[in-house]
Amino acid sequence: MTDVEARTEGAAGPVFAYAPAPESRDIVHLDAEYGLFIGGEFRPAATGRTFTTVDPATEEPLASVAEAGGGDVDRAVAAARAAYEGGWGKMRGRERAKYLFRIARIIQERARELAVLESLDNGKPIRESRDVDVPLAAAHFFYYAGWADKLEYAGFGPSPRPLGVAGQVIPWNFPLLMAAWKLAPALAAGNTCVLKPAETTPLSALFLAQICQEADLPPGAVNVVTGAGATGAAVVAHPGVDKVAFTGSTEVGKEIRRTVAGSRKRLTLELGGKAANVVFEDAPIDQAIEGIVNGIFFNQGHVCCAGSRLLVHEPVAELVVDRLRQRLATLRLGDPLDKNTDIGAVNSAEQLAKIRRLADAGSEEGAERWSPRCTLPERGFWFPPTVFTGVSQSHRIAREEIFGPVLSVLTFRTPAEAVAKANNTPYGLSAGVWTEKGSLILWMAQHLEAGVVWANTYNRFDPASPFGGYQESGFGREGGRHGLEAYLDV
Ligand code: NAI
Ligand code: MG
């Protein structure tokens, strides 16, 4: 390869070739088999059943993982109950805090290993697992460790009490981070947990279980039961669970809500989204382009709050789309472990099939499809960054969550039209606004029906900032003081 590659079609200038910069895989030691983490110990599932988790970038098997059945879930809930009654629920907050601080520090110490592990099991670029997933996971434990001895100052009364045993079901898009979002506030508030990671990405939750052991967390305070939907359903339906927290698809969220209806169980749901990223004509265009790219191509678009609908002001629509195409032509797709990779692998064959199906629907319904020229690896699950223009609000690609690197571009003329179009969705998780005018930002934030509104930025997260949705995006908040409410009897 020469040091200046042939100009990619649509690129603004010469694109410099990058030498491969792979992160070493050797830092992660994988066992051939992983058991369930119950009562502080790893053990095989009583069912004897296992499933295989693969590297989506190569389709190579990574490890065989225990599949928990009803009996295993029973044992995990019993272990969590015993730990709750036996001390965790009564322990002074400042003692609980010490464990959480310890977990946070071990995550930091093992950061490189966890980042490689996450990229192997999920397919996300190492740049993201290293700079976002793992540091934010540690930050969540640090943040909630700080709350553990200050719960009476959180605004929920003088002596807020924990709920008991929390059953927590999480998805595959941010496996370690979602585990941290669920476990850290629950433990800080004095609850014990039964966590069910997603079937395509169980490994980082199991490494986190090892970290709990290393931190001497009392046995049973955290239990991890691996398996697919049936295992998750068993956790949700278990009569010994006091609180259910779920992140995943709206469809499963609705099913869970039906399951817990009429019971005493508390419920929080973080579901899908179809966020609008709104760019006004006075926006700083270069920053907006970066925000659009980050909004929809971060983590291959497997993001519930992804800015999957770009609403662009008509006077700058052509300019924005043009610049966006130039920028996309410079993105690097490929080996998730390469530090220069921008776009990694799609997490599973099923998700790839869903993205293809919806993108094809976009073409069939008459929108114009564009992708930069890019070579997809032969093995593994891959989808190129894709932009649809000429999209109307009735198109499926403007209504349904694709959960992939696919952007639908619509235009508007006035702020009122932007708001009407942005809110024309059954979801309501997030939105982005790009303009120089502070007054317009505030007006938009008041009128957008979304749990999070980013202004002149996108996909920004901080453990101190609450996150959650409206309507079919779910209810309840994670992060911040608000995130404690889900785990306290208030
Ligand atoms: P999913 O909702 O089926 O899976 C999420 C988690 O729920 C996994 O741990 C899964 O094992 C578990 N689960 C599945 N069925 C369950 C049930 N009946 N009871 C309890 N737990 C259950 O999501 P899936 O099938 O992986 O993805 C489908 C679509 O959902 C995606 O294409 C995307 O549009 C959306 N999704 C949204 C996410 C978000 O963060 N908002 C995360 C994952 C998926
Ligand atoms: Mg599913």
Image (cartoon, rainbow, N blue to C red):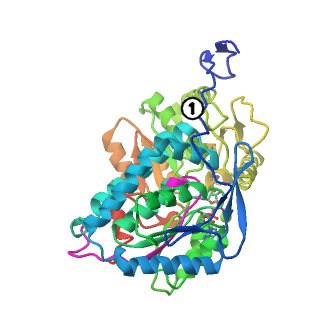
Q: Is mark 1 within 8 Å of ligand 1?
A: no
Residue 161: % across, % down: 30, 77
Q: Is residue 349 left or right of residue 390?
A: right
Is 336 within the magenta?
no
Quadrant (top left/top right/bottom left/bottom right) for the C terminus: bottom left
- Element at badge 1? loop
**Which one is nearer the viewer's eye here, 364 or 152?**
152
Residue 54: % across, % down: 70, 51
Query: Image height check: is 473 above or below 419?
Result: below
Q: Is residue 485 left or right of residue 151?
A: right
> Does the rendering let one see residue 24?
yes
**Which one is nearer the viewer's eye here, 32 or 134?**
32
Q: Is residue 124 left or right of residue 479?
A: right
Query: Image height check: is 325 above or below 4?
Result: below
Residue 482: % across, % down: 34, 63
Quadrant (top left/top right/bottom left/bottom right) for the N terminus: top right
The span picked out in magenta is 155-176
**Residue 391 falls in which quadrant of the image?**
top right
Within 10 Å of the Cα at label 1, are there few (<14), some (14-19), or many (20+) other Cα atoms? some
Query: Mark 1: which amino acid?
Result: Lys
**Which one is nearer the viewer's eye here, 270 or 407?**
270
Quarter of the render that holds ligand 1: bottom right
Report which residue position mark 1 lands on: 339
> Does the rendering let one see residue 313?
no
Classified by dominant secondary structure, the portion drawn in magenta counts as loop
Q: Residue at x 49, y 77 (%)?
A: 79
**Residue 231 falls in which quadrant of the image?**
bottom right
